[in-house]
Amino acid sequence: SKDEYYWVDLVGCAVLNREGAALGEVFAVEDYGAHPILKTRDAAARERLIPFVAQYIDAVDIAARRIVADWQPDF
């Protein structure tokens, strides 16, 4: 389906929030049981864990290597 992705395809994607702020690049996808988690690292080497669920993920564009998330940089 259009909402299913191979995790390997998500690695390397840039993650931006709705306002266009960079949240880093996906370096891993982990699944601890409840739902997958995107692990991102930004230019300052700050890591974030963003749930890969429809509540937080607005768009995934594999061709453009970009994910848009409803997430704030200070989370």
Image (cartoon, rainbow, N blue to C red):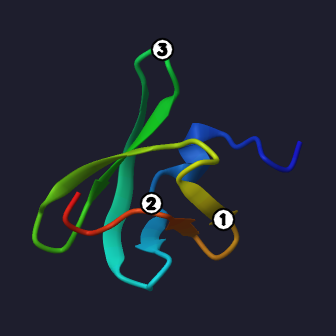
Q: Which residue is mark 2?
A: 12
Q: Tell me what residue is drawn at x 10 percent, y 71 percent.
A: 44
Quick check: 27 left or right of 75? right
Tell me which label, 1 or 2, sits earlier in the chain: 2
Q: Nearer the viewer, residue 49 or 43?
A: 49
Label 1, residues with CA under 10 Å away: few <14, some 14-19, many ≥20 = some
- First reached walking from the N terminus: tag 3 or tag 1: 3
Relative to 28, 9 lies left or right: right
* Contact (Cβ within 8 Å) of mark 3 with mark 1: no
| Three-letter amino acid code of the residue under disc 3 | Gly
Which label is found at residue 33? 3
Q: Which amino acid does the dot numbered 2 rest on?
A: Gly
Q: Which residue matches tag 1?
A: 59
**Dot 2, crowdedness within 10 Å: few (<14), some or many (≥20)?**
some
Q: CA distance from mark 1 to mark 2?
A: 15 Å
Residue at (13, 60) in percent of width and height: 46
Point out the frontmost of discs 1 and 2.
1
Vertical arrangement, residue 8 with respect to residue 45, above or below: above
Is disc 2 placed on a helix, strand or loop? loop
Examine the rendered structure and indicate whether residue 40 appears above or below residue 18.
above
- Packing grade of label 3 (10 A; few <14, some 14-19, many >=20) is few
